[in-house]
Image (spheres, grey):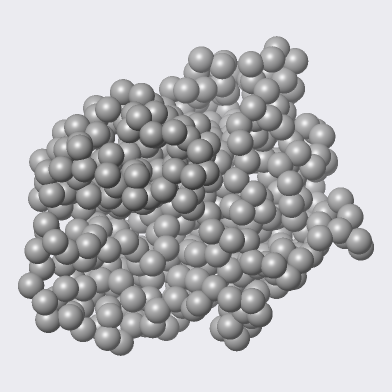
Amino acid sequence: MPPTINAVRSLWLSTGGGLPQECLQKLTLSEDPDTAVNSSFKIASAAQTTIGLAALSAAHFHELQTGTRQTITVNARHAVLEFRSEAYYTLDNQLPGSIWDSIAGLYKTKDDSFVRIHTNFPHHRHGILNILKLPDSAETTREQVQDALLRWNAVDFEDAAAQAGMCAFALRSFEQWNQHPQAIALRDTPPVTVMKIGDAPKRKKVKFKPIYPLEGIRVLDLSRVLAGPIAGRALAAYGAEVLLVTSPNLPALPNIDVDTSRGKRTTQLDLTQERDRADLQRLTRDADVFLQAYRPGSLNKKGFGVKELVGMKRKHEHGIICASLCAWGWDGPWKDRRGFDSLVQTATGFNLAEAEAYSEFQGKTFNRTHSQPRVFPMQALDHAAAYLLAYGVNVALCKTITDGGSYEVRVSLAAVGQWLKSLGCIPPTTAYGIARPLPMVTYPPVQEVKDLSSEWVERNDPTHGRKMTALTHAGILSETPAREREAPMGLNSDSAWWTTLV
């Protein structure tokens, strides 16, 4: 059995908790994943596995509702490209531009190590520069940041950033990470968990025949950046009504938001205001899924913890699915720390291991002090986490039909990284000598990207509004193709109401 099918089977059987094993026969994984992208880690296998699981579980929910049986195909190269979707879309024939702040990235430190800083949000940039005693201005250069960080040891700066609530992490090897208390806390944690958290009646089958697998499902999406919003985007592609709720007090990331909000409706609520909290409570009472990517426990203070969400549902109706994403997991000393994909890659050993593999391919001796760390070709942990979160939601939806109840789905970037590492490595001669690099980001797009892209229109003004092209979903369902046609193209395009009648 191919390794990728083994990975799918393992997660399906461990997480499905009663989902039929014969469903796996409906999934076809095409193309050799080991040559689909130039990394020594099995990123393409992870892409095929996670997208395949999300699509397969959506199709199974549709079958439970309607009896419709269908097959799913996931091509490894298409899946890998979708793992970098935020780079390949266009808006009115323009590329989105870089998602990175000018000073974000890796820097040498005094102890001959490295530290990675994440400054894409303005308040995170300000906080990091404040620690470094540098002005927060457009004129501040990477050279100034580098000079300042050469006065710090890597772990000391990591600790100082954590105390200030900022985002910076020291470079570690796999061996160093394995000895870290947070790694020990994560040990044996699966990449996605589905737990029953309350009793509720079984979900009644819909009274109409859905065109899409999740048609009639209402999803509240309270997430930012990549993993959470991409999970919501996948659920929207399978037909759910997804309402993205963001705060008007937080900065937007338009180059990312336009891509990750495709297929959703968007609104803004200020949860520091009583009226807006009441609106979110009203929306939650009629929601099927509450998806959020706040740090563990953060929403409890606002009255939207898991127990409160379960209590908001009407007693005579089906339960709710609470889907939660975080960076470092729900236990351990780092559970309350902020984190992003690039930071998790650096802190948990991937950047050093990738650099070591590339040095081997080049026939060079790897030297940790002088060799440059090497990043993944995309934010693979974010994207894998996104589709695992969507998969977990679909598993829980299936359980609401067969068993009833409310469920919590948990995914962390660090646990996803742990799972990716467990898939094994690709020989450097294959990873860098045979495997294909990702296409260049250009306009007009290269033919490969063009062939896999579709057109989207601005939902509130489909005739005269903005137009975009974006990569299609790599999970190809034989009977219910992904819903891909309209995008909000803004974070406050809609009122805070559900439109779906169920």
Q: Is residue 125 left or right of residue 254?
A: left
Q: In this orientation, which residue lies closer to the viewer: 184 or 158? A: 158
| Residue at 38% across, 50% down | 142
How many numbered badges does the structure rendering display? Answer: 0
Q: In this orientation, which residue lies closer to the viewer: 73 or 343? A: 343
Residue 408 in the image: state x and y as whole percent: 47, 34
Q: Is residue 387 above or below residue 403?
A: below
Residue 288 in view, yes or no: no
Name the quadrant containing residue 410: top left
Position of the C terminus, as image quadrant, is: top right
Residue 241 in the image: state x and y as whole percent: 72, 46
Name the quadrant containing residue 153: top left
Q: Is residue 454 left or right of residue 325?
A: right
Residue 436 in the image: state x and y as whole percent: 38, 82
Residue 230 in view, yes or no: yes
Q: In this orientation, which residue lies closer to the viewer: 178 or 206? A: 178
* Residue with the most extreme right position: 463
Q: In this view, does 472 lie above or below 389?
A: below
Residue 453 in the image: state x and y as whole percent: 65, 74
| Residue at 52% across, 22% down | 299
Position of the N terminus, as image quadrant, is: bottom left
| Residue at 50% across, 77% down | 440
Q: In this view, does 171 lie to the left or right of 488?
A: left
Name the quadrant containing residue 80: bottom left
| Residue at 50% across, 64% down | 84
Q: In this view, does 40 lie to the left or right of 131?
A: left
